[in-house]
Amino acid sequence: MCFIDPVECIDCDACEAACPVGAIFRDSDVPNEASGFTELNALWFSDKTAARQQVASFADSSSSVL
Ligand code: SF4
């Protein structure tokens, strides 16, 4: 899983256009069903341990942020 620092990002859209699977959105354009990923992405930059635990919990359960 890749993360984008929401503080450093300048919203140039280069990565959104380059992503082969359409998984990158401006924070203002994230689909509602994927909104949980915005919080997880930001969490990575404040608490990597918590972010890793959250990702692991997704993998270990049938629940999802979607
Ligand atoms: S939009 Fe993507 S490529 Fe542009 S600054 Fe933000 S993360 Fe980097």
Image (tube, rainbow, N blue to C red):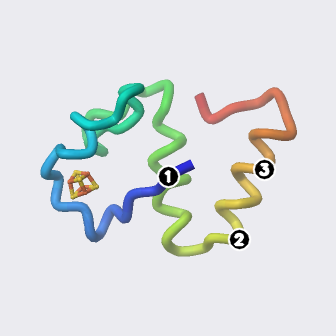
Residue 22, x across and y down, in percent: 36, 27
Mark 1 or mark 3, earlier in chain: 1
Residue 49, x across and y down, in percent: 71, 71
> Are the residues flagged by discs 2 and 1 in contact, CB closer than 8 Å?
no
Left/right placement of residue 38 relative to residue 19 reads right
Q: Quadrant of residue 18?
A: top left
Q: Give, as a three-letter code, the residue at label 1.
A: Cys
Residue pointed to by mark 2: 49
Mark 3 or mark 2, earlier in chain: 2
Q: Nearer the viewer, mark 2 or mark 1?
A: 1
- Callout 2 environment at 10 Å: few (<14), some (14 to 19), or many (20+)? few
Residue 23, x across and y down, in percent: 41, 32
Query: Secondary structure beneath disc 3?
Result: helix
Q: Is residue 7 above or below residue 3?
A: below
- Callout 1 environment at 10 Å: few (<14), some (14 to 19), or many (20+)? few
Q: Give, as a three-letter code, the residue at label 2.
A: Thr
Q: Residue at x 17, y 52 (%)?
A: 11
Q: Residue at x 53, y 41 (%)?
A: 36
Residue pointed to by mark 1: 2
Q: Give, as a three-letter code, the residue at label 3.
A: Ala
Cα distance in 3D space between marks 3 and 2: 10 Å
Residue 47, x across and y down, in percent: 61, 73
Query: Secondary structure beneath disc 1?
Result: loop
Cα distance in 3D space between marks 1 and 3: 14 Å
Residue pointed to by mark 3: 56
Left/right placement of residue 60 relative to residue 48 reads right
Mark 2 or mark 1, earlier in chain: 1
